[in-house]
Amino acid sequence: MEILGYSMEQVYFFVLVLMAAGTFLYLFFGDVTEAIGEGIPFLHPTLVLAFVTLTSATGFFLEWLTDLNSWIILIASLLIAGILDMLIYFFVLIPMASAEVSLAYTDEQLAGQVATVIIPIPADGYGEILIETVNGNLAKRATGLENEDIDYGKTVLVVEVEDGTFYVKEYEPIKI
């Protein structure tokens, strides 16, 4: 079978090269098209590019390796690409969409964390605490919740955060 004087093998290869260029461009300008996939998830640009690329690649190889009818090859290519596209959607895109996007945090998110006093906190004054997180260690300005003295090395609980100041009290773990 031919389309506009080109064999199907040439058509599949041309589409494959065109989709490779489209995928390369999508790497750089994908954020512009990201809103398209929000309303209808199966029209997500990643899925459309993957579907057309897989269809053309499968069609090219089947035309090249077999003597099957071009219509059978086209149908088989569409089915294979559809199945692989669904696998990409359910096992790659959905898990990546629910993954944590950023390692950034706000001071307010640190309330409830346990920390260690690294500069003693005087009554009616400020000291410094060290909070160990997954992202690393954070040193923050702190004061006693009830304006009490807290010595160096004590374990404290961050009760609240206000204007960059952490209000803490001594932490006493429950012993069972």
Image (cartoon, rainbow, N blue to C red):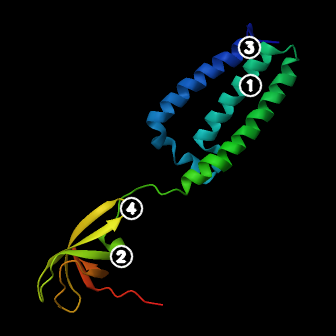
Of residue 4 and residue 137, the one placed in the foreground of this image is 137
Numbered circles on residues, count? 4
Mark 3: give few (<14), some (14-19) or many (20+) Cα within 10 Å: some
Classify residue 59 as left or right of residue 169. right
- Element marked by disc 1: helix
- Element marked by disc 4: loop
**Residue bearing the label numbered 4:** 134
- Element marked by disc 3: helix
Q: Give the farthest residue toward the front.
A: 176
CA–CA distance in space, label 4 to label 3: 52 Å
Residue 141, above or below 7 = below
Please state which of the two labelled residues, at mark 1 or mark 3, is closer to the viewer: 1
Percent from the top left, x then y, of residue 27? 48, 34
CA–CA distance in space, label 2 to label 4: 12 Å
Residue 113, which numbered label? 2
N-term-proximal mark, 4 vs 3: 3
CA–CA distance in space, label 3 to label 2: 62 Å
**Residue bearing the label numbered 1:** 58
**Residue bearing the label numbered 3:** 9
Mark 4: give few (<14), some (14-19) or many (20+) Cα within 10 Å: few
Residue 115, above or below 50 = below
